[in-house]
Amino acid sequence: MNKNIKNEMKIEFSSKSANEAFARISVAAFASQLDPTIEEIADIKTSVSEAVTNSIIHAYPNKDGIVKLRARLLEDEIEIEVSDTGEGIENIEEAKVPLFTTKGNLERSGMGFTIMENFMDELKVESIVGLGTKVTMNKKIKKTKELEKNTY
Amino acid sequence: MNVKHFIEDKVLLFEFTEELDHHIAEKIRKRSDYEIQRFMPKRVIMDFKKVNFMDSAGIGLIIGRYKSTNCYGGTLELMNVNNKIKRIFEMSGVLKIVPITSDFREAKQTG
Ligand SMILES: Nc1ncnc2c1ncn2[C@@H]1O[C@H](COP(=O)(O)OP(=O)(O)O)[C@@H](O)[C@H]1O
Ligand SMILES: [Mg+2]
């Protein structure tokens, strides 16, 4: 499954909540090269927002840290990686269960991973307690727009 | 967020004008609870007409305000929820406890 990487971007930023909008807007702008639909862009923005927010609030609960974001454009899909070097997740399967949260007191809903799973085509979560977490998400960008153009 | 008080009907309307993520939700939470606690409205309505982005922070925001209105007998309703936002609410099951009202006038009449 080694697809050609057409383009790649990386950004790193402090784990400040003001950067949530910056992160999702950056990925959306980068993804626009694949000519996605408005719906596809909305799904990508929501998923990036979920992953980045998780690193900001769960990985570094009481301190500032660095959140890394990498996006790659493959032939017909985008791959997004969000990683941190924070607390890590003890039980990944449990963390993915809808409504499961360890931060109910902060009005978290426990729906972050469920949304990423539903809005993207693939979701991979790797984590080691004390070392950090890496979330990799892929989404196919359909090529229907090309066909539409050709009919004119 | 714009806040509108309808004193005669005891209705409090929050019109969200921002992107509802974790960063913004933290700010809205404090302001909305302040308004709810000092006005104790019969019904609180949240208007999503001007929201063009929402993630799971919106779910937490609603469940939190459901609790702060429910505790003294008030109700919470949502309005102008587009399909994108609705899909996120539906995943969480929150619409089982917080109904969507088709428009504010109707909300006023049926209450
Ligand atoms: N980057 C991360 N670092 C540490 N823990 C995380 C991370 N991402 C998710 N988690 C854990 O997984 C749980 C579920 O995440 P999620 O589904 O996004 O729900 P929520 O963020 O609302 O709690 C979180 O409550 C947290 O315990
Ligand atoms: Mg989350």
Image (cartoon, helix red, strand yellow):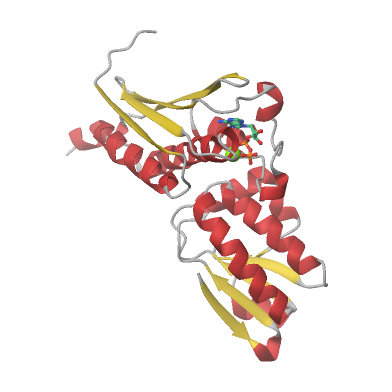
Q: Quadrant of the N terminus of chain A?
A: top left
Q: Is residue B107 above or below residue A63?
A: below
Nearer-the-camera pick, A47 or B82: A47
Ligand 1, seen in the image, is in the quarter at: top right
Measured as percent of width and height from the top left, residue B73 is found at 83, 72
Residue furthest bottom in the image: B8
Left or right for A109, reference A78: right
Residue furthest top in the image: A1
Measured as percent of width and height from the top left, residue A125 is found at 56, 21
Nearer-the-camera pick, A20 or B54: A20
Identified at 70% across, 30% down, the residue is A97
Residue furthest left in the image: A152
Q: Is residue B21 visible?
A: no
Q: Quadrant of the C terminus of chain A?
A: top left
Identified at 71% across, 37% down, the residue is A102
Q: Is residue B26 above or below residue A97?
A: below
Nearer-the-camera pick, A21 or A76: A21
Q: Is residue B27 visible?
A: yes
Task: Count numbered badges in the picture.
Answer: 0
Left or right for A55, reference B52: right
Measured as percent of width and height from the top left, residue B14 is found at 57, 72
Nearer-the-camera pick, B28 or A97: B28
Identified at 40% across, 38% down, the residue is A40
Q: Is residue B77 above or below residue A74?
A: below
Identified at 65% across, 29% down, the residue is A96
Rendered image quadrant of residue B100: bottom right
